[in-house]
């Protein structure tokens, strides 16, 4: 068998990527997912309890990716409900709200929680993307500057970061596209340089024929 593992993905099928969205409660994780999947925004979005997921196809560079997007509950009391779903993730979106410094300060906690429960070793390259949501808010409400975000990302080896507004639909599509590009970048690098070639196991590339969606424990408190 050839060592060109990257070319084994049949173009006629989708590549399924599991994307998990993490961050403190109320930063807008559910709104980002709903804006991306349904192009809708709910001003009075309820707390998520546990996790929910929705699928959405994304076309990039002549390939179709089915993003299985997992929206998790940000509140501490739902920790044990959300963490079992981190395993098998392909992309992790670390989210904060630009008008709430504490949600930004907690990014390190979210990154650590993800790495631990997804069972990924600390220094293994992984497609993280940092999203500063609620960019529609006025500059007087802003508590986290773009420079602070860039600095934190640089310190944490994260090269994908963006500010979004689920409310105005600003940069939401772009955030998911950026996340997939980051996944492709690392996948290609892993294929070429890092992961020893294995005839039988391709942990990153999965294929789906159809679309599904379901909810697990969503609703009001
Ligand atoms: N101004 C503004 N408000 C937003 C934006 N995104 C979400 N919100 C509001 O922020 C609140 C929380 O949004 P959610 O999407 O429920 O937050 P969450 O991160 O999923 O919260 P948990 O489920 O508790 O983890 C809601 O009142 C939203 O309307 C945004 O881009 N701009």
Image (cartoon, helix red, strand yellow):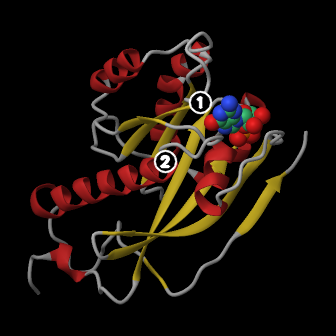
Q: Residue at x 50, y 55 (%)?
A: 19
Give the answer, above or below, for where 72 lies relative to 196: above
Disc 1 secondary structure class? loop
Q: Position of residue 58 (x, y in %)?
A: 45, 68
Give the answer, above or below, for where 182 lies relative to 213: above
Quadrant in which the N terminus appears: bottom left
Disc 2 secondary structure class? loop
Q: Is mark 1 within 8 Å of ligand 1?
A: yes
Q: Which mark is residue 13?
A: none
- 93 sits to left or right of 75: left
Q: Position of residue 145 (x, y in %)?
A: 44, 15
Split into quadrants, the picture shows ligand 1 in the one at top right
Q: Position of residue 9 (x, y in %)?
A: 28, 81
According to the picture, the residue beneath numbered tag 2 turns out to be: 118
* Label 2 Cα crowd, 10 Å radius (few <14 / some 14-19 / many 20+): some
Task: Please name whichever residue, 56 or 42, is drawn nearer the observer in this view of the structure.
Answer: 42
Q: Residue at x 59, y 30 (%)?
A: 136
Q: Residue at x 83, y 41 (%)?
A: 46
Quadrant in which the C terminus appears: top right
Q: Is mark 2 within 8 Å of ligand 1?
A: no
According to the picture, the residue beneath numbered tag 1 turns out to be: 136
Give the answer, above or below, for where 130 lies relative to 19: above
């Amino acid at each position: 068998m050839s060592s060109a593992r990257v070319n084994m993905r049949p173009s006629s099928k989708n590549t399924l990527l599991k994307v998990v969205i993490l961050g403190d409660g109320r930063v807008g994780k559910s709104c980002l997912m709903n804006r991306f999947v349904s192009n809708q925004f709910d001003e009075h979005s309820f707390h998520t309890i546990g996790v929910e997921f929705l699928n959405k196809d994304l076309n990039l560079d002549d390939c179709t990716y089915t993003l299985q997007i997992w929206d998790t509950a940000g509140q501490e009391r739902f920790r044990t409900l959300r963490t079992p779903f981190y395993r098998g993730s392909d992309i992790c979106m670390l989210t904060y709200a630009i008008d709430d410094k504490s949600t930004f300060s907690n990014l390190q906690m979210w990154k650590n929680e993800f790495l631990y429960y997804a069972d990924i070793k600390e220094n293994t390259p992984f497609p993280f993307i940092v999203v500063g949501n609620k960019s529609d808010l006025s500059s007087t409400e802003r508590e986290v500057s773009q420079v602070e975000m860039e600095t934190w990302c640089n310190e944490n080896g994260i090269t994908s970061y963006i500010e979004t507004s689920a409310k105005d639909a600003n940069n939401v599509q772009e955030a998911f596209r950026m996340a997939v590009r980051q996944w492709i970048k690392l996948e290609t690098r892993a294929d070429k340089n890092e992961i020893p070639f294995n005839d039988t196991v391709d942990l990153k590339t999965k294929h789906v024929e159809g679309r599904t969606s379901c909810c697990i424990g969503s609703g009001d408190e």
